[in-house]
Image (cartoon, rainbow, N blue to C red):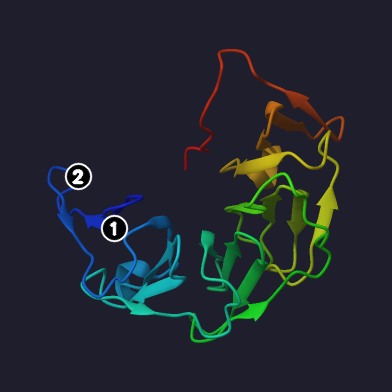
Amino acid sequence: FYSTTNAGVFKSNNRGVSWFPANNQLADLQITSLAFTPDFATSKILFAGTLMSGIFKTTNGGDGWIAANNGLQELNITDVEVTAASVLLVSTQTKGVFRSTDGAYSWQESNKGINEKLSIQSDIHFFDLAISSDSSAYQNIFLSTFEGLYYSDTEGQNWVQLDVFNQEITRGIAVSPDFAQDRTLFATTYGGGVLKFNDSTDSWEAVNRGGLMILHADP
């Protein structure tokens, strides 16, 4: 699957040799994120976050989509993620995080611990969610916001703000595939470049040589 910012979702059945649109009943083609359930190979369930119309769900591998926004207080989605226990988390532009434990049939606000003071410097305050790939009951979840970087080990039920230089510049987050062992974490910032978490010193360091523009942890 491949998501676009103005043409919806595309699907390939031959490892990317050719692609076709998978937008049936997808009301918003401005896709901000895609998330697969852990059992996607058999369930064919995945979720699409959209810029203006909330969350859409497919149960047939993208052949058809339905809106899944019951309980969402904002439909401007910046990211959607699914934990190993199939708990869904979405970040919205200004209303923070919402959580679903029933496959997106309903959503509940989940912002306990997040600073509610919104900076006037940005129209988008909540940018990115990232989940560690470890197999623990409660995976490590990170949320990057204009108000700081937050961490949860309760599947998004509670959040703790982390100390990342200037706390009001975090834009993106990437977690090492071996996070449980190496505790490696990267953060992109507004004006501060890329930061890397040093577990041995419990601190962050700038790693900006080469002029990095995009950050993504290779699975």
Report x, y in % for residue 47: 41, 68
SS type, badge 2? loop
- Residue located farthest toward the front when viewing the structure as drawn: 120
Kindly identify the residue that appears in the image at 67 percent across and 67 percent down: 95
> In this figure, which residue is indicated by the disc labeled 2?
16
| Mark 1 element type | loop
Where is residue 179 shown, x and y percent of the image?
A: 65, 44
Residue 207, numbered circle: none
Most foreground residue, 32 or 137: 32
Residue at 38% x, 57% y: name it: 31
Q: How dense is the environment of label 2, judged by Cα within 10 Å: few (below 14), some, or many (20 and up)?
A: few
User: In this image, 184 relative to 55: left or right?
Assistant: right
205 lies left or right of 88? right
Nearest the viewer among 19 and 126 is: 126
| Residue type indicated by callout 2 | Gly
- Residue type marked 1: Gly
Residue where numbered disc 1 is placed: 8
